[in-house]
Image (spheres, grey):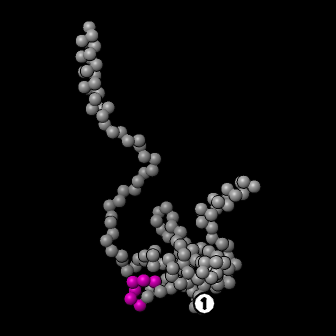
Amino acid sequence: MVARKVLAAAAVLAILGPALAQDNPAPSRIAMPATGAYPVRQDSTQLLGSNLIGAKVVSITNETIGRVTNLVVNENGAVEAAVISIGGLFGVGHKDVAITFKSLVIARNKAGDAIDHVTVAATRDDLRQAAEFKPLSRQMVEKEAALRR
């Protein structure tokens, strides 16, 4: 009798063993986009973000306004805005203002492989009066501080 139970248990384990041994990872909550393209070179119509960040920003009248300090990129990978730092000296007293990417006129250097400057249809005074750009991290800190009060 005991031998039958042992044989039955062994048979069940032999049948279920491979199924139990399989790794069934938890389903991912984030759907990963399939990628099949791995660009190997930059096209002449494309810009590198590293060339744009740090670029000098000038007005239409060639008045120096500031420098591009960051880019705002949406979830689809499109650049929506450039953050421009205006005023200040050595990072003190500056103000960050975002300008839509479509509003920028980007001038390349003579070789065409980098950015010489960026022109915007605004003056330094226009941007000084514009609302300051607040990244999400700063918004969250301010929100937490307001809740503590």
Secondary structure character of the magenta stretch overall: loop
Residue matched to label 1: 63
Q: Is residue 3 above or below residue 95?
A: above
Dot 1: element: loop
Q: Give the vertical position of 69 relative to 28 (above or below).
A: below
Q: Quadrant of the N terminus?
A: top left
Q: Nearer the viewer, residue 63 or 146?
A: 146
The answer to whether residue 130 of the structure is visible from this angle is yes
Residue 22: where, in percent of width, then height? 31, 36
Q: Residue at x 52, y 71 (%)?
A: 71
The residue nearer to you, when weighing 4 against 118, is 4
Residue 120 visible at all: no
Camera-nearest residue between 98 and 50: 50
- Quadrant in the picture for residue 36: bottom left
Residue 112 is a magenta residue: yes
Residue that protrudes farthest toward the top in the picture: 1
- Horizontal placement of 63 versus 145: left or right? left
Give the side of residue 146 with respect to residue 54, left or right: right
Amino acid carrying label 1: it is: Glu
Where does the image place residue 74, in percent across and percent down from the top left?
51, 64
Magenta-colored span: 110-115
Q: Quadrant of residue 14?
A: top left
Residue drawn at 58 percent across, 91 percent down: 62
Q: Position of residue 65 (x, y in %)?
A: 60, 84
Front position in the image: 83 or 90: 90
Name the residue at 66% across, 78% down: 93
Location of residue 143 with respect to 56 vertically, above or below = above
Q: Residue 72 in magenta?
A: no
Left or right: where 69 falls relative to 13: right
